[in-house]
Amino acid sequence: MISVGLLARLKAKPGKEAQLRDLLKSAESLARAESKTVVWFAFETPDQQCWIFDAFADESGRKAHLEGEIAKALMKVAPDLLAEPPDIKPVSLHASKLP
């Protein structure tokens, strides 16, 4: 059962939106390699803010993800790419539907 997740908002610096999209697309393979990451989505809203939602069976999965390769890659480029620090919120999941 999926019980916890993360919702992260990422706002690119002006002119860096395409670079942020490319980073998120490349992170998909890293997410697939994380055995404890049950679901991972990277998406963009019409206001050009990017978001990541990921979910885990338990707190150990969430912790492993926060210490993993995606987080390291994002923190490495954040000063150059992001207009503000990532807004990352832990969430508790009450229900889900997956294929």
Image: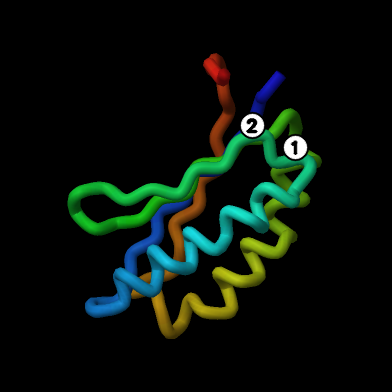
Residue 36 position (above or below residue 18): above
Q: Residue flagged by tag 2: what amino acid is it? A: Val
The reply, left or right, for residue 40 in relation to residue 10 is: right
Q: Residues within 10 Å of mark 2 (few under 14, many from 20)?
A: some
Say which quadrant the N terminus sits in.
top right
Q: Quadrant of residue 50?
A: bottom left
Q: Residue furthest bottom?
A: 80
Q: Secondary structure at mark 1?
A: helix
Can you say which quadrant of the picture contains the C terminus?
top right
73 lies left or right of 60 = left
Q: How is the model colour-coded?
A: rainbow
Q: Position of residue 36 (x, y in %)?
A: 77, 40
CB-based contact (under 8 Å), mark 1 and mark 2: yes
Nearest to N terminus: mark 1 or mark 2: 2
Residue 15 location, x and y as percent? 24, 79
- Distance from disc 1 to disc 2, alpha carbons, whole Å, reads 7 Å
Q: Which disc, if any, is residue 81?
A: none
Residue at x-position 32% and y-position 70% = 18
Instruction: Give the secondary structure at mark 2.
Output: strand
Residue at image x 70%, y 43%? 62
Q: Residue 73 is drawn in which quadrant? A: bottom right
In x, y percent, where is residue 19? 38, 74
Q: Which residue is mark 1?
A: 59
Looking at numbered disc 1 in the image, what kind of residue is underneath it? Glu
Taking the spot 65% from the left edge, 51% from the top edge, the residue there is 31
Q: Residue at x 43, y 67 (%)?
A: 22
Q: Nearest the camera: 24 or 52? A: 24
Q: Which mark is residue 4?
A: 2
Instruction: State the image quarter where residue 58 is shown.
Output: top right
Q: Is 95 drawn above or below residue 87 in the view shown?
A: above
The image shows residue 49 at horizontal and vertical percentages of: 29, 56
Bin the neighbour count of mark 1 within 10 Å (Cα to Cα): few under 14, some 14-19, many 20 and up.
some
